[in-house]
């Protein structure tokens, strides 16, 4: 590489590294919600009562799926479900996925116990949790305090997806997709 007189070797290396980082961040799949029309990827987790579940269970009826990947995103998740009552029919299933990367010293049971304190008991079976980030990995999601939200049709295909808070303009995409179901 020809040396530009304004940049030292260290400066060129830093610029090259920054360029590579920006390419990786913008590369498809770096933060890739399942695309419209795609089936929900396969994954499994236990609910807050320790019952085992698999993503195939989300077939059979339209679903609003709210996913959090950060332990401090609970309030943002609750916002989506509060708003859902005003925006989608009761026939749309509501599903919570909590997929975290917690230290090995935190047990799945301890994480479940903490989640139970924040989730009303009526929704424990519809709240799936994994402490090792397995669902996030299957879905291609990065850690974020902002929820990921999917609208699924009755066949389990994605009809809309956003990485947004409920008060963002992007929320209309989800509400529109599910109000037609």
Image (cartoon, grey):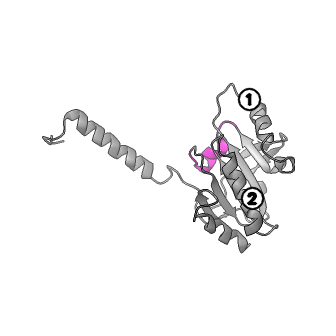
Residue at 74% of width from left, 63% of height from top? 84
Could you tell me which secondary element the residue under label 2 belongs to?
helix
Residue at the extreme right: 122
Q: Which residue is mark 1?
A: 107
Numbered disc total: 2
Can residue 63 be found in the magenta stretch?
no
| Neighbourhood count class around disc 2 (C-alpha, 10 Å): few under 14, some 14–19, many 20 upward | few
Label 2–label 1 contact, CB within 8 A: no
The relative height of residue 20 versus residue 33 in the rendered view (above or below) is: above
- Residue 172, by quadrant, is bottom right
- Residue 35, by quadrant, is bottom right
Residue at the extreme bottom: 180
Residue 180 visible to an observer of this rendering: yes
Q: Which mark is residue 82?
A: 2
Can residue 140 be found in the magenta stretch?
yes
Report x, y in % for residue 128: 76, 46
Residue at 79% of width from left, 69% of height from top? 89
How far apart, in angstroms, are the residues tagged by discs 2 and 1?
29 Å
Residue at 24% of width from left, 37% of height from top? 11
The relative height of residue 137 versus residue 95 in the rendered view (above or below) is: above
Quarter the N terminus occupies: top left
The relative height of residue 68 versus residue 91 in the rendered view (above or below) is: above
Report x, y in % for residue 42: 68, 51
Highlighted magenta segment, given as a residue range: 131-142
Ranked by sequence position, the earlier of labels 2 and 1 is 2
Report x, y in % for residue 52: 81, 43
């Amino acid at each position: 590489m020809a040396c530009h007189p304004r940049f030292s070797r260290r400066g060129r290396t830093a610029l090259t590294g920054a360029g590579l980082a920006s390419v990786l961040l913008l590369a498809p799949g770096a933060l890739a919600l399942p695309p419209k029309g795609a089936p929900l990827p396969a994954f499994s987790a236990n609910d807050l009562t320790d019952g085992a579940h698999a993503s195939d269970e989300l077939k059979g009826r339209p679903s609003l799926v709210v996913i959090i990947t950060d332990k401090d995103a609970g309030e943002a998740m609750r916002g989506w479900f509060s708003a859902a009552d005003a925006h989608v029919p009761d026939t749309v299933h509501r599903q919570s996925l909590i997929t975290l990367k917690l230290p090995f010293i935190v047990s799945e049971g301890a994480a479940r116990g903490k989640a139970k304190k924040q989730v009303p008991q009526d929704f424990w079976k519809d709240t799936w949790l994994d402490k090792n980030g397995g669902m996030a990995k299957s879905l291609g999601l990065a850690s974020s305090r902002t929820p990921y939200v999917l609208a699924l049709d009755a066949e389990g295909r994605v009809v809309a997806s956003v990485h947004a808070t409920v008060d963002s303009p992007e929320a209309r995409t989800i509400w529109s997709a599910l109000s037609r179901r």
